[in-house]
Image (cartoon, rainbow, N blue to C red):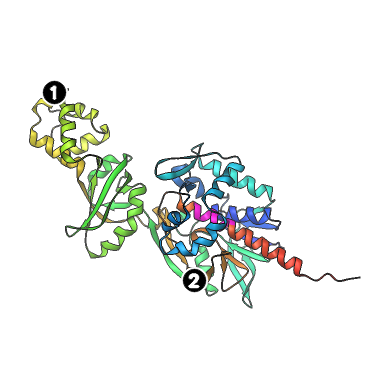
């Protein structure tokens, strides 16, 4: 058994932990980063479909923070210290140019999450962070209102002046996010809101969705119904059909609302694949297209109008033979096809669960955290960053921005407090 001493111990090598470790080290602290996986940033490398949506280019702080709901007030101070612009400046300074896509989503120009990992790794190397992978924490030791050590499962103990907990939530447990931090915190008296899926794909009853698995629409409109009543306003955005239902940013952001209604009965979602035009205009456009291809089979004619992957499924749902000559398509069949494009319905049977969630809600309750420093109000030498906090947010770059902001603030605060303590030590004259 070995006892290792340093200034700051960071537990968890995800995006928030890497940022916190780098910031504390650059500020002069001796930092050890503990990660139980064989490598850092496992979940980071799969975010945004492997492209990593690092933030959202909404520079109005009030508008940005409104996306975090009731946590907006809590986050105002940390975002005042390190917000969207500071995040972009950080990555640009560390060799990672960025680009802005639809809905102000920011990605690395490389379209590769590895670029984000590389930038963070360079940052940690600048500060000479000591990284210990394959390191499994057993317990957090506390004495007299302070954390005084991290007990490892192999018997080693890490002792530091400050401790930063960056163990994440419970989404994608295959990446190591298994909720360890929540158990440790409850054991030392912190209040933890039980984690549950927050941004998660939905499962539907209709089996035909499997035929469309992998097909996406960049601008669809979804409307949710229960007992023939619209249960919240229609929303537009990108959707993706999966083998068992639907995903994509729009679906993920609706999933929490849908889950709240499911206990009271089936939820039906109406999918409008052409929200930019009304049904009459769409019918005119389709008729004009078909008039130029009267002698072709209907499946071939429709390829000029909708995604080819969609055609067999829609024709099957309408019991229209795809080999039928276009000129023999009846007016009723054409109108039925148009109506389906504007209102194709699926019945939600549930959400896919924590293992498929992009993020989980729940975590350390915010009244127990000092937002200015991201510091525990119960243990003043303990800090919290990233998904371990009970903060809901939508998809679109908000989750990673939460990691950058809280990680930076916690790392800076920890190093600053250590420096203050050093300067407060009286110099003994000889």
Q: Which quadrant of the figure contains the N terminus?
A: bottom right
Is residue 337 one of those drawn in magenta? no
Q: Is residue 394 in view?
A: yes
**Image-quadrant location for residue 370:** bottom right
> Between tags 1 and 2, which lies in front?
2
State the residue position of label 2: 367
- The local secondary structure at tag 2 comes to helix
Among the 4 quarters of the image, the one containing residue 198 = bottom left
Within 10 Å of the Cα at label 1, are there few (<14), some (14-19), or many (20+) other Cα atoms? some
Q: Report the Cα–Cα distance between label 1 and label 2.
A: 68 Å
Q: Disc 1 or 2, which lies upstream in sequence? A: 1
Q: Which residue shows up at 47% across the image and 43% down it?
A: 106
Q: Which residues are magenta?
A: 401-408
Q: Residue 67 bears which disc, if any?
A: none
Q: Residue at x 58, y 50 (%)?
A: 38
Residue 406 falls within the magenta-colored stretch: yes
Q: Residue furthest right?
A: 430
Q: Which secondary structure is most common in the magenta stretch?
A: helix
Q: Is residue 222 above or below residue 333?
A: below
Element under disc 1: loop
Examine the rendered structure and indicate whether residue 22 appears above or below residue 5: above
**Whether residue 5 is situated above or below residue 145 in the rendered picture:** above
Quadrant containing the C terminus in the rendered view: bottom right
Residue appearing at x 45%, y 57% in the figure: 62
Q: Which mark is residue 294?
A: 1
């Amino acid at each position: 058994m070995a006892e290792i001493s340093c200034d700051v111990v960071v537990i968890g090598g995800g995006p928030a932990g890497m940022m916190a470790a780098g910031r504390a080290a650059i500020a002069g602290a001796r930092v050890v980063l503990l990660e139980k996986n064989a490598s850092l940033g496992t979940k980071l490398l799969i975010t945004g479909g492997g492209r990593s949506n690092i933030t959202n280019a909404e520079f109005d702080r009030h508008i940005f923070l409104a996306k975090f709901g009731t946590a907006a007030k809590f986050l105002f101070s940390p975002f005042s210290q390190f917000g969207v612009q500071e995040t972009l400046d950080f990555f640009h300074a560390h060799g990672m140019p960025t680009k802005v896509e639809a809905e102000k989503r920011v990605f690395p120009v490389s379209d590769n999450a590895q670029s984000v990992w590389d930038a963070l790794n360079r940052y940690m190397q600048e500060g000479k962070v000591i990284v210990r992978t394959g390191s499994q924490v057993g317990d957090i030791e506390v004495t007299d209102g302070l954390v005084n050590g991290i007990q490892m499962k192999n018997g080693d103990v890490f002792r530091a002046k400050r401790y930063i907990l960056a163990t994440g939530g419970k989404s994608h447990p295959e990446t190591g996010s298994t909720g360890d931090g929540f158990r440790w915190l409850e054991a030392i008296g912190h209040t933890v809101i039980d984690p549950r899926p927050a941004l998660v794909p939905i499962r539907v009853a209709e089996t035909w969705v499997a035929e469309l698995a992998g097909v996406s629409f960049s601008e669809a409109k979804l409307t949710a119904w229960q007992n023939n009543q619209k249960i919240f306003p229609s929303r537009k955005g990108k959707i993706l059909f999966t083998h068992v239902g639907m995903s994509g940013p729009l679906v993920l952001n609706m999933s929490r609302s849908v889950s709240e209604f499911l206990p009271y009965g089936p939820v039906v979602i109406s999918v409008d694949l052409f929200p930019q035009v009304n049904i009459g205009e769409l019918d005119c456009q389709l008729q004009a297209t078909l008039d130029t291809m009267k002698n072709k089979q209907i499946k071939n004619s429709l390829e000029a109008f909708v995604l080819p992957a969609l055609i067999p499924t829609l024709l099957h749902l309408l019991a229209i033979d795809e080999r039928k000559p276009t000129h023999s398509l009846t007016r009723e069949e054409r109108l039925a096809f148009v109506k389906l494009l504007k209102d194709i319905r699926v019945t939600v049977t549930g959400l896919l669960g924590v293992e498929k969630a992009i993020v989980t809600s729940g975590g350390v309750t915010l009244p127990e955290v000092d937002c200015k420093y991201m510091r525990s109000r119960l243990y003043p030498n303990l800090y919290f960053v990233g998904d371990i906090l009970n903060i809901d947010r939508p998809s679109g770059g908000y989750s990673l921005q939460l990691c950058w902001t809280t990680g930076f603030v916690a790392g800076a605060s920890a190093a600053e407090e250590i420096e203050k303590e050093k300067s407060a030590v009286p110099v003994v004259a000889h």
